[in-house]
């Protein structure tokens, strides 16, 4: 079975193509969204999703979120003595989603379509693919998030659509795609983005704004740094959500039993977020320029991603486009639903025979070259593009180069991805060396062919016509070959971690939530939560399913009530 | 049925019906497996785009033939826009570039922006003409205020107007430079111009302005005492000629680095320097014409110290030791004949078929004398010992060789390093230090042939018999060569520096081999001291 997965910075979701429509699969807690959070305690006890997120406040050192931002880098996280790569952490989320599908359908998914930000580079895509493999899923295709959202948006009525713009601002990444639909063809015209901009950055801006206003800095200073950061970030996210529906909201944290609070107005938040809002403009302009489409002729501005709920973002968009954006698709669900449509397409799902998707390469791909200027000065590290960004994929281009020095024995092609003239500012993907016959400078020609396929895999062929010498490099393979062995190893290592049985998930999540709430309140309220917690633990000890269910429900109602009417 | 491109690819007759074109494209696309027919897909896209363009052309022609719907006027407007070149009307800013709103309906803030634009133009083009004069204080205030209004307008404007302001200001400032200098930072803060610096499709006006912006920032930084080039800057801005004492106080390299950098990157900054001072430094041995130069390339210069005599001394001691071992040379006639034959075989092995000891003596008597004691070595030892000795002498020939022969020597080094690299790190390190005597360097037949030819060249140039001097030898590798070596070795700048300067570095062999190759690739360009040192 093939499923579609939105592996997000903040939340993830899984959907499948069923009965001619994409359908979301609920997790063990009955929710569509599973927070992309992992927590591990000493001894290997592991939490994924909601429960892990709740442990963020109580056990910040053991818990990690937003690891999607580390994908494609060498950074690792150590939780309770276990060192994990961002791929490992993503794999744990993916596995939990696969568990949910198995529970819902009785069948374990074997393959998946996983979404990635359109502006993810080659390395980040490779890392995502590996995460899927570690989770035991064959990654049939990586599809760009705005493309998936466009599918979900456009296939509701299947009518033709003039070019529209998908504005996808998630928890950690920002993408813009311009998409057109006609005769069942979904055609991405251009994509641009910023893979370091998302809701997380707005939280950070809010923390910076509020921290000096909280008063009693001593109480805050007593907290260890990671705990202070976790509490502030969580409170910022709550406040940010509250500001989506109110003119002002209280930013509240409890530091070591001392409640600290500050009132934030929409205006103050907008000012704090202004530098971020400014960064939304450039990718939009770039995408429009690249496909030569006039902003006035766009038929719609489609909002996707949780962060587009923020009024400050919507306001900026309304100003930018001179009209109101379209908020009809569910900002958190559209990407997973689109991924399920792609999964349906790949497995020949009913009702999708007519649909075809064409996408573009998001970055310019090329090689490093050197040249001599008219003064005989030698300039190296100059980027020579071979495939320009926003070229429809698959695509295959050939470019000729010549030797630079007399009797040069070999030519080294370093392959880069990016938009800077100086290759050092771009991402290096690999290197290829080809021997050439010794001749005077410029007399030996070398042909370089770049082939970029629909999944975003780049293949490079180099040929020296004078000797017939050929070299080939499949960029994805190179790294995969090295990692193929350790994928199996990582999978085994992760299996050693003790994930709670699925039927305990609700209890585990409730415990984590109650513990977080206990920490988050003071005085009488804290006592009440403590009582509820003790009762629930008592019920768990008795191992009577009915007793447990009652206690859980009671505690849940209590927490709902308290959180809806905070006493502060 | 014969249709021509693009219609044959789409499988339809020529039409101006865009819906029909799209449908045809969709049908062909559905029948194509794009991953397997990449060229076909590209051609199909091209056919579709061309068909749509043809359709648009014929539609336009029809419209122009029929009623005049005002499109002709629109075309005129566009043409006028295109004429906005460098002449009278510098850069345009229309609050409503699409021309969709009639003028009277411009908002108040748009009208304010328009007035501010005029004010800015007034300052930058005093009396309506270009000027190289600096702005006065009043003009500065007025223009800054006007720019403030325009920036504020851009913040609240839609994409199109924001874009127009961004482009318009960039063009205006680029054209009115240097008068516009005081305003560029302010505009950069609003439009992130520097964020576009170095991007492939950087706008030409920004390419110019960003370079100036970087120059201004460099100017600011270089005046602070902690800037690495501060001393050189202070020296060059002092009035008058530089005396001997001044030259001692500042590093020559830094002064030239600064001058070169300013001239290639920020020529406008040279006006801050004292012309007489600069001229006196220019005369004192300029680095003019040196490849590479400023910035990252020059920062990467590596200074290397090699001990030349060490291996020679070792070889010498091992030789005298063997002499003792051997005792007095035999006077036996048969043994003597054998020794001569052995030496001839060894010479043929070293310099190639046909080279006897007599030939070596004829070419370079000094070498023959030096080789004589080896002939006394027992049995098989003589040949390898002589080869090791000759190889070492070839390495040591750097002291006296000219450029052509230095190139031969580098070829030899390359040959040895490549072979050693293929063997093991230990072998490679021995070869690097010239310890040929206690290492088994395996060469293929082809490599041996090449080695013989190269050694023979050195022999004929009488370079092998020259007494090698020991001692320290210091040379610096210029930045461009470091860059090339980095590329060849795949090592980072730091790792490469460590590898070339620290004998215990694990990358030593790789780095040295890459350096040798880099030198070989550009023998004419490499400074002589590097050519001798490598």
Image: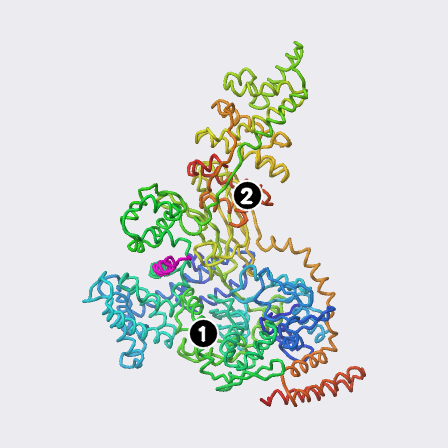
The quarter of the displayed image where residue A258 is located: bottom right
Question: Which residues lie in the magenta part?
Answer: B212-226
Front one among B325 and B195: B325
The quarter of the displayed image where residue A515 is located: bottom right
Q: Position of residue B440 (x, y in %)?
A: 64, 31
- Residue A277: mark: 1
View extreme (top): residue: B333
Q: Position of residue B501 (x, y in %)?
A: 53, 43
- Residue A30: mark: none
Quarter of the image that includes the C terminus of chain A: bottom right
Q: Position of residue A27 (x, y in %)?
A: 67, 77
Tell me which chain the residue with mark 1 is part of: A
Front one among B394 and A297: B394
Q: Main secondary structure of the magenta part?
A: helix
Check disc 2 and report the residue beneath it: B511
Q: Position of residue B388 (x, y in %)?
A: 60, 27
Q: Residues within 10 Å of mark 1 (few under 14, many from 20)?
A: some
Question: Where is B189 relative to B233, above or below?
Answer: below
- Depth-wise, is mark 2 or mark 1 nearer the camera? 2
Quarter of the image that includes the N terminus of chain A: bottom right
């Amino acid at each position: 079975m093939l499923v579609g997965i939105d592996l997000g910075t903040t939340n993830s979701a899984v959907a499948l193509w069923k009965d001619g429509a994409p359908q979301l699969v609920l997790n063990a807690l009955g929710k569509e969204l599973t927070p992309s959070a992992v927590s591990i305690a000493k001894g290997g006890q592991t939490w994924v999703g909601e429960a892990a997120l709740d442990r963020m406040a109580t056990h910040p050192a053991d818990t990690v979120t937003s690891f999607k931002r580390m994908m494609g880098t060498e950074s690792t996280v150590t939780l309770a003595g276990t060192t994990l790569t961002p791929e490992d952490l993503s794999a744990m989320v993916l596995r939990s989603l696969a568990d949910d599908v198995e529970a819902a359908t009785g069948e374990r998914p074997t393959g998946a379509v996983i979404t990635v930000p359109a502006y993810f580079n080659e390395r980040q895509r490779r890392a995502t693919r590996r995460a899927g493999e570690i989770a035991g899923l064959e990654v049939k295709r990586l599809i760009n998030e705005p493309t998936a959202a466009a599918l979900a948006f456009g296939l509701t009525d299947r009518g033709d659509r003039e070019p529209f713009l998908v504005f996808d601002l998630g928890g950690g990444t920002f993408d813009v795609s311009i998409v057109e639909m006609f005769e069942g063809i979904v055609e991405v015209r251009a994509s641009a983005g910023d893979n370091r901009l998302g809701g997380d950055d707005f939280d950070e801006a809010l923390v910076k704004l509020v921290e000096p206003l909280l008063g009693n800095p001593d109480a805050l200073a007593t907290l260890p740094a990671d705990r202070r950061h976790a509490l502030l970030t969580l409170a910022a996210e709550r406040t940010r959500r509250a500001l989506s529906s109110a003119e002002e909201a209280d930013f509240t944290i409890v530091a070591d039993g001392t409640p600290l609070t500050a009132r934030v107005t929409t205006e103050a938040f907008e000012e704090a977020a202004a530098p971020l809002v400014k960064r939304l403009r450039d990718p939009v302009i770039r995408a429009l320029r690249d496909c030569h489409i006039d902003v006035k002729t766009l038929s719609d501005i489609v909002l996707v991603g949780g962060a587009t709920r923020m009024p400050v973002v919507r306001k900026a968009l309304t100003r930018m486009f001179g009209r109101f954006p379209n908020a009809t698709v569910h900002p958190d669900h559209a990407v997973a639903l689109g991924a399920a449509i792609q999964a349906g397409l790949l497995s020949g799902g009913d009702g999708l025979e007519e649909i075809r998707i064409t996408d573009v390469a998001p970055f310019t791909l090329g090689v490093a070259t050197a040249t001599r200027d008219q003064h005989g000065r030698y300039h190296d590290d100059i980027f020579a593009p071979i495939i320009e960004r926003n070229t429809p994929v698959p695509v295959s281009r050939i470019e000729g180069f010549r030797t630079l020095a007399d009797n040069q024995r070999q030519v080294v092609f370093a392959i880069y991805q990016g938009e800077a003239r100086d290759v050092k500012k771009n991402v290096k993907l690999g290197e290829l060396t080809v021997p050439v016959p010794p001749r005077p400078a410029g007399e030996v020609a070398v042909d370089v062919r770049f082939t970029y396929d629909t999944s975003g895999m780049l293949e490079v062929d180099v040929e020296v016509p004078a000797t017939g010498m050929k070299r080939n490099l499949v960029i994805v393979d190179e790294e995969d070959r090295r990692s193929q062995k350790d994928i199996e190893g990582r999978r085994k290592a992760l299996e050693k971690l003790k994930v709670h049985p699925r039927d305990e998930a609700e209890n585990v999540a409730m415990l984590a939530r109650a513990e977080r709430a206990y920490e988050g309140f003071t005085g009488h309220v804290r006592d009440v939560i403590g009582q509820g917690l003790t009762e629930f633990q008592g019920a768990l000890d008795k191992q009577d399913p009915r007793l447990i269910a009652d206690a859980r429900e009671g505690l849940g109602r209590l927490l709902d009530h308290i959180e809806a009417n905070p006493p502060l | 049925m014969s249709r021509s491109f693009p219609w044959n690819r789409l499988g339809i007759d020529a039409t101006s019906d865009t819906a029909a074109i799209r449908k045809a494209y969709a049908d062909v696309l559905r029948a194509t497996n794009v991953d397997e027919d990449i060229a076909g897909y590209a051609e199909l896209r091209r056919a579709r785009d061309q068909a749509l363009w043809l359709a648009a052309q014929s539609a336009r022609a029809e419209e122009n033939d029929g009623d005049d719907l005002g499109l002709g006027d629109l075309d005129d407007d566009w043409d006028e826009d295109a004429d906005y070149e460098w002449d009278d009307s510098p850069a345009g800013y229309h609050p409503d570039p699409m021309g969709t709103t009639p003028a009277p309906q411009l908002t108040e803030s748009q009208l304010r922006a328009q007035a501010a634009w005029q004010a800015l133009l007034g300052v930058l083009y005093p009396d309506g003409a270009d000027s190289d004069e600096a702005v006065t204080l009043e003009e500065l205030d007025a223009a800054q205020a006007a720019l403030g209004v325009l920036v504020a307008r851009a913040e609240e404007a839609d994409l199109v107007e924001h874009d127009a302001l961004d482009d318009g200001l960039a063009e205006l400032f680029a054209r009115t430079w240097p008068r516009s200098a005081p305003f560029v930072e302010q505009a950069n803060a609003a439009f992130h111009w520097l964020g576009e610096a170095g991007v492939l499709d950087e706008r030409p006006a920004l390419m110019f302005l960003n370079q100036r912006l970087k120059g201004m920032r460099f100017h600011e930084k270089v005046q602070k005492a902690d800037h690495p080039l501060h001393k050189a800057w202070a020296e060059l801005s002092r009035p008058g000629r530089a005396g001997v004492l001044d030259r001692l106080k500042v590093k020559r390299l830094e002064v030239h680095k600064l001058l070169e950098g300013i001239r290639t990157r920020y020529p406008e900054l040279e006006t801050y320097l004292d012309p007489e001072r600069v001229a006196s430094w220019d005369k004192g041995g300029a680095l003019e014409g040196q490849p590479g130069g400023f910035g990252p390339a020059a920062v990467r210069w590596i200074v290397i110290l090699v001990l030349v005599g060490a291996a020679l001394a070792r070889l010498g001691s091992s030789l005298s030791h063997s002499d003792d071992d051997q005792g007095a040379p035999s006077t036996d006639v048969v043994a003597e004949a054998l020794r001569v034959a052995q030496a001839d075989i060894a010479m043929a092995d070293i310099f190639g078929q046909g080279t006897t000891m007599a030939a070596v003596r004829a070419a370079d008597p000094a070498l023959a004398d030096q080789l004589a004691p080896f002939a006394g070595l027992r049995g098989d030892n003589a040949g390898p010992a002589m080869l090791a000795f000759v190889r070492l002498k070839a390495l040591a020939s750097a002291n006296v060789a000219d450029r052509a022969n230095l190139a031969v020597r580098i070829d030899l080094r390359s040959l040895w390093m490549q072979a050693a690299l293929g063997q093991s790190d230990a072998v490679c390190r021995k070869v690097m230090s010239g310890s040929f005597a206690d290492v088994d360097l395996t060469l293929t037949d082809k490599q041996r042939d090449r080695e013989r030819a190269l050694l023979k060249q050195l022999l004929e140039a009488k370079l092998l018999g020259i007494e090698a001097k020991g001692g320290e030898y210091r040379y610096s590798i210029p930045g461009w060569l470091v860059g090339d070596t980095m590329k060849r070795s795949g090592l980072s700048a730091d790792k490469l520096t460590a590898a070339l300067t620290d004998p215990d570095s694990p990358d030593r062999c790789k780095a040295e081999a890459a350096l040798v190759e880099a030198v070989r690739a550009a023998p004419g360009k490499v400074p002589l001291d590097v050519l001798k040192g490598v």
